[in-house]
Structure formats: structure tokens, C-alpha cells
Image (spheres, rainbow, N blue to C red):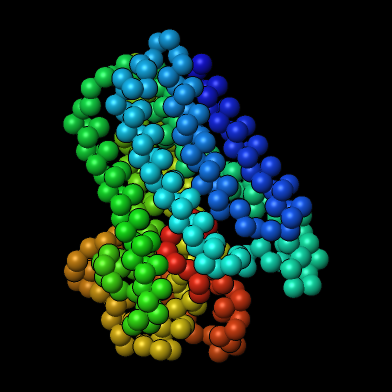
């Protein structure tokens, strides 16, 4: 089975899972298993790609290919954690206010088309993020040994996964313990204002680069269009987390910072000035402003601009997920 066929079947599987989820969820008027099916979709693709990729006569068996083993295991750990975390968070939140309007809660008329869009966006998210994993698992390349290149990027991928997991756990414990100090600055949060988002972005860049060695192109991955297509995975993650207002930094920063500036303006201003918005590091306060505004992603659009016409209640309504956020994920 060729790589193209495995990619195509993976797309069909993804749309099928999300479509079935939409039908069941809308019939029951619930969003309970939206995030859970996203996590399960990832794991399903990892299992399918591993099985289908090992079925080719020309390729190494899964157990004989260290790249396929490491990618399947690490991808499974990353998305398995996401599944566990989102299931726990859904239980803690007792619902997800993102879907109240489209499901007709609170007296609103239901919006089946908009609810369907939610599910199809999740399908696109799952599939695009999974592309480097599918690329490695579906490859016929016979390289039974790890190179130094493979080892370095595998370790960095592990680091990205661990940063996200540790950040999620530390933030969740901080919330459970009563949000001491008004904003989270413990553990990795002392070195990055959003270490969970950094871990999510960083791991997909590492996985895409790691997948280079699995290119079937004789001249190398740099002339392989399928390998280049995999760059969509980290770029799409960055687009979601850096630029889309319903989630990520656009939701966590900006007007959502009002509660910090109201409660502890000087202490939070110091934390913000001396702590990187994304990349965990020491000495951020010494970084020149123009570098913060460019390569460190601390863009002006994330600054808090007080608006006299916006009440606390309207802020909570506009940013419900961040007000109750426990940490991770694109779908926060």
C-alpha cells in the first residue's frame, strides 16, 4: 500500500469518526465527548498507520524499524496524554460553554450547521497534526539503524511532550489548590507564560524534522513534496495558538489579562516583563524589545488595553475557556 493511499484512508477514517461524533452529539444535545473523540481519533490514526505501513512487502516490519517504533510510541504518549487531560478537564468543568449557543442551551435556537463546523474543524486539526507521523509510519525506507540526526530530534520531540505534560499538571494543581498568588508562576510557568503552548508547538516541529529520514525520495526529503506537506502540522498549530481569537494566546492574553491587572498590577507587570510569553528561558527581561516583538512572539496584539466600555461579565462571556482553563491544548 503506497504512502498516498495510507494518507487518503487516514483522511477517510478521520472524517468518519468526527461525522459519527457530530451525529451522536447533536442527537443527544451534548458536547461531552467532543474533546475525547479528538484524542481517540489521533490514537486510531497512529494504530492504523503503523499496521498499514508494515503491511508493505518492501518495508521493514514495524518491530524492525526504530523510526516507526519511536514515532508511534511518542505520538501515542503525546495524544494519549491529551485524551486523558481533556477527559479530566471536561469532567471538572461539567460542560463546555463554547457549545451552549450552537446546541440551543439557555433558550437559544440550536445551530446544527455551526455545530457541524466544530466537528469538521477538529477533523482537519487531527489530520493535519498527524501528517508527519503518517509519513514515517507509511514509509518504505529501509534504515534499521538510528542516525545521530534521528536521535537528536527524537530527544527534542520527547522534551516537547514532557514540557506540555508537566505544564498541564502544574497548572491543574495550582488551580486545584485555590489559584494561590492570582496567576500561575510555579514550575515551568516561572520561565514561560504559556509553556504548555510552547510544548505543543515545539513537539510538532521536532516530529516534522525527524520525519526527514523516512523520505522515499532518492534525492532526500528536501525534494519530497510529501515530506514538505508535513510542515503544515507545526504551522497549523502555530496559527491556531498564536493567531486565532477563540483559543491560544489571543484568548489567554489581551483583554483576558484584566483580572491580573485589577488584582495585582505591579506583581503581574513584573512577571510579564521578565517572563517569556512562549519559549522557556532565563533572563527574558534583558531581551531587547524589538526581539521580543519578533522572534520571541511577544507581539503587541497580546498587550492588555483597558476598555472602559467592557465589564467583567462581558470579558468572562467572551473568554469562558480561559477563565476556567486548566492548561493545555489547541481546543482550550
| Residue 141 as seen in the image, left or right of residue 326 | left
In the figure, residue 167 lies in which quadrant?
bottom left
Which of these two is toward me, 130 or 78?
Answer: 78
Pinpoint residue 80: horizontal percent, then vertical percent. Answer: 43, 46
Which of these two is toward me, 323 or 257?
Answer: 323
Q: 94 above or below 22?
A: below
In the figure, residue 182 lies in which quadrant?
bottom left
| Residue 60 as seen in the image, left or right of residue 284 | right
Q: Residue at x 27, y 38 (%)?
A: 154
Q: 307 above or below 202?
A: below
Q: Residue at x 35, y 81 (%)?
A: 180
Q: Is residue 216 visible?
A: no
| Residue 193 as seen in the image, left or right of residue 225 | left
In the figure, residue 246 lies in which quadrant?
bottom right
Q: Residue at x 39, y 46 (%)?
A: 78
Pinpoint residue 233: horizontal percent, then vertical percent. Answer: 45, 42
Q: Is residue 199 visible?
A: yes
Amino acid at each position: 500500500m503506497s504512502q498516498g493511499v495510507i494518507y487518503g484512508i487516514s483522511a477517510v477514517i478521520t472524517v468518519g469518526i468526527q461525522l459519527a461524533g457530530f451525529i451522536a452529539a447533536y442527537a443527544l444535545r451534548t458536547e461531552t465527548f467532543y474533546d475525547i473523540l479528538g484524542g481517540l481519533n489521533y490514537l486510531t490514526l497512529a494504530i492504523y498507520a503503523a499496521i498499514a505501513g508494515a503491511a508493505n512487502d518492501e518495508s521493514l516490519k514495524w518491530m524492525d524499524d526504530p523510526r516507526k517504533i519511536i514515532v508511534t510510541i511518542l505520538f501515542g504518549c503525546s495524544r494519549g496524554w491529551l485524551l486523558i487531560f481533556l477527559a479530566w478537564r471536561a469532567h471538572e468543568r461539567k460542560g463546555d460553554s463554547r457549545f451552549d449557543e450552537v446546541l440551543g442551551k439557555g433558550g437559544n435556537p440550536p445551530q446544527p450547521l455551526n455545530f457541524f463546523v466544530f466537528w469538521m474543524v477538529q477533523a482537519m486539526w487531527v489530520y493535519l497534526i498527524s501528517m508527519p507521523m503518517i509519513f514515517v509510519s507509511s514509509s518504505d525506507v529501509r534504515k534499521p539503524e538510528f542516525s545521530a540526526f534521528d536521535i537528536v530530534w527524537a530527544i527534542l520531540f520527547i522534551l516537547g511532550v514532557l514540557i506540555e505534560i508537566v505544564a498541564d499538571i502544574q497548572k491543574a494543581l495550582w488551580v486545584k489548590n485555590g489559584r494561590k498568588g492570582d496567576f500561575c508562576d510555579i514550575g515551568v510557568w516561572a520561565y514561560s507564560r504559556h509553556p504548555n503552548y510552547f510544548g505543543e508547538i515545539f513537539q510538532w516541529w521536532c516530529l516534522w524534522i525527524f520525519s526527514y529520514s523516512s523520505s522515499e525520495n532518492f534525492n532526500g526529503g528536501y525534494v519530497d513534496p510529501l515530506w514538505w506537506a508535513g510542515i503544515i502540522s507545526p504551522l497549523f498549530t502555530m496559527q491556531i495558538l498564536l493567531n486565532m481569537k477563540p483559543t491560544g494566546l489571543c484568548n489567554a492574553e489581551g483583554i483576558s489579562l484584566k483580572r491580573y491587572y485589577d488584582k495585582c498590577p505591579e506583581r503581574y507587570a513584573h512577571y510579564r516583563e521578565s517572563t517569556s510569553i512562549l519559549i522557556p528561558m532565563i533572563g527574558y527581561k534583558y531581551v531587547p524589545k524589538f526581539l521580543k516583538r519578533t522572534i520571541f512572539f511577544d507581539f503587541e496584539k497580546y498587550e492588555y488595553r483597558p476598555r472602559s466600555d467592557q465589564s467583567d461579565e462581558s470579558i468572562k462571556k467572551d473568554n469562558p475557556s480561559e477563565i476556567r482553563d486548566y492548561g493545555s491544548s489547541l481546543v482550550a
